[in-house]
Amino acid sequence: MLRELDIRNFAIIDALTVSFAEGLTVLTGETGAGKSIIIDAVHLLAGGRGSQEFIRHGAKKAEIEGLFSLEDEQHPVFRKLDEFGITKSDGDILLRRELNDKGKNVCRINGKLVTISILREVGASLIDIHGQHETQELMDEKQHLYLLDQFAGKSLAKSKESYSHTFDKYTKLKREFSSYTENEQQIAQRIDLLTFQLQEIEAAELVIGEEEELVLERKKMQNFNKIYESISAAHEAIQGESKGLDWVGSAMSELEHAAAVDETFTGSSETLSSAFYLIQDTGSEIKRILDDMEFDPSRLNEIEQRLAVIQSLKRKYGTSVEDILLYHEKQADELDKLVNRDQRLQLDQEKLKELTEDLRVEAEELTILRKKAAKSLGKAIMEQLKELHMAKASFEVNFDILPNARFDRNGHDAITFYISTNLGEPLKPLTKVASGGELSRMMLALKTIFSKHQGITSIIFDEVDTGVSGRVAQAIAEKIAAISVDSQVLCISHLPQVAAMADQHLFIEKRVDKQRTTTAVTELDGSERTEEMSRMLSGAEITDLTLQHAKELLSLAADRKLLMK
């Protein structure tokens, strides 16, 4: 559940901290007071699309932080945290998002810096926001298949994964097949280009490690004089007029004489003797190197030319010799396919036929599983609609095949929700017959069903009661309260029936301080709550009658909630 929300410099909110309770929290207040702004902040916190327009005028950044607490240690969100290397904290999850005036986002989970996509993925496991755009989602027939598959869940998942794997192979092969049947002139040009590139690379006879060796050899040749002078000086010091080796030899002889008389000098004598012969061998080795050293300008030129060839190929085909050779392998494979495309076309045609048949079989399996799920979904929705005073409504999922017998990533099913809201009327597409109030009830029915499958800890309803009143309003209020028994629910509402069912009632209002408008939140209790509900009933003036009605609603709600627990 969402325990606490902290908002800074967001829209008209200056600084606001709200603590939420378990069960149903209802947010009420005048239109424009900032109720939906709070929901927008939660949406942004869960990875929703941000905008610089959200930043309060005069501020450099907006900051939103939300603390969630989960009692279920096996909740799927904890696996996501492990997957992303995020430290867990005794069932608490802290989401934080900053949006600055440059349009940059800074997102954190439990203090760890994360990408917006990770924040969105974790947020989707914690919060489910239902508002006007979700009702509009029902009006988009493309979403009906998604909703059905979501309901089918695990029973469909394995078959859908298998189909997706086959579909990927099919689309990849189809792209290759299309590339072989392109304009012959383009293919001929491509063959010429590939042939030239391969010949250029092959002519270079590249060897892995050669470039590094050449660079080292070039460095030696470029510093030939300096190296020669240093080695000559070393040889002169050892065996030249300086007579370095002779002096060491004299010292060695003297120490040998001393050691013959006094064993104390034996160690020093042996050490110097070893040094003498080592220096003597080194001097001979240096002399041999000096005799062999010869500067060859043509070799340096040869190295420069070879390195220039390698550098030219690197500019065209890769950043290293290894990359160039991999590029050669890839281009050679493409050239082989193009040159032998007639044979390849025949093989691909046969493979495409096989994959098309595999797709058809797997798509049919998806259809069978979806039809089974559709019956269960229809039955579940009818039960929910009955409780929402749409007892005479009929619902079913209509199946059709995609135009031109084609396949897409989801199979070949075209799904449409059909409904009849009046007895005796034929079923028609939901998008053509449902009113605003009916759509709200339809979506509430779906949310009631799906909330049992998704493991969402916090569900947010943003004015789902729009367009309803009377007993329908009471039914919606009870349905929302029933959902809150198993999940925390935050609900923005203008209906007193919904407010009466609240476990926590928050009043949102605008205030003006120092010529600036801001949003404030007050938790209502006792008489304050009764007065707010009275205002909601009357629309403006609070009377004894509306106060009495508010008290009756609260009493009725308390009785209904006892029956739910």
Image (cartoon, rainbow, N blue to C red):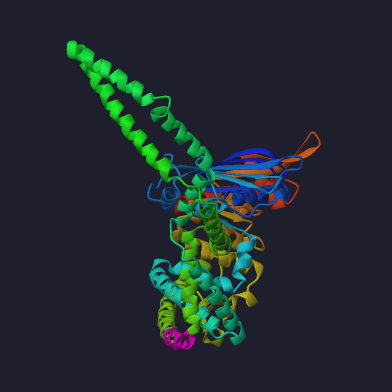
What percent of the width, then of the height, locates residue 91?
43, 42
Choose top left, top right, bottom left or bottom right for residue 305.
Answer: bottom right
Task: Kindly identify the residue that appears in the image at 41 percent across and 85 percent down.
Answer: 354
Of residues 422 and 229, the one drawn nearer to the viewer in this rendering:
229
249 inside magenta stretch? no
Task: Kindly identify the residue that appears in the image at 46 percent across and 63 percent down.
Answer: 206
What percent of the width, then of the height, locates residue 272?
28, 22
Whether residue 81 is visible to the viewer of this picture, yes or no, is yes
344 inside magenta stretch? yes
Whether residue 530 is visible to the viewer of this picture, yes or no, is no
Q: Is residue 10 left or right of residue 397?
A: right
Task: Kindly identify the residue that appears in the image at 26 percent across and 19 percent down.
Answer: 253
Of residues 353 and 74, the one drawn nearer to the viewer in this rendering:
353
Q: Is residue 161 left or right of residue 180?
A: left
What percent of the width, then of the height, locates residue 326?
46, 65
User: Can you say whether 565 is above or below 411 in the image?
Assistant: above
Choose top left, top right, bottom left or bottom right for residue 58.
Answer: top right
Residue furthest out toward the front: 241
User: Can you say whether 421 is above or below 210 in the image?
Assistant: below
Q: Is residue 391 left or right of residue 259?
A: right
Residue furthest out toward the right: 515
Q: Main secondary structure of the magenta part?
A: helix
Task: Kindly identify the residue that appears in the image at 23 percent across and 22 percent down.
Answer: 270
What percent of the width, then of the height, locates residue 180?
53, 83
How many dots with numbers?
A: 0
Of residues 359 and 279, the one drawn nearer to the viewer in this rendering:
279
Report the magenta residues as a range: 340-352
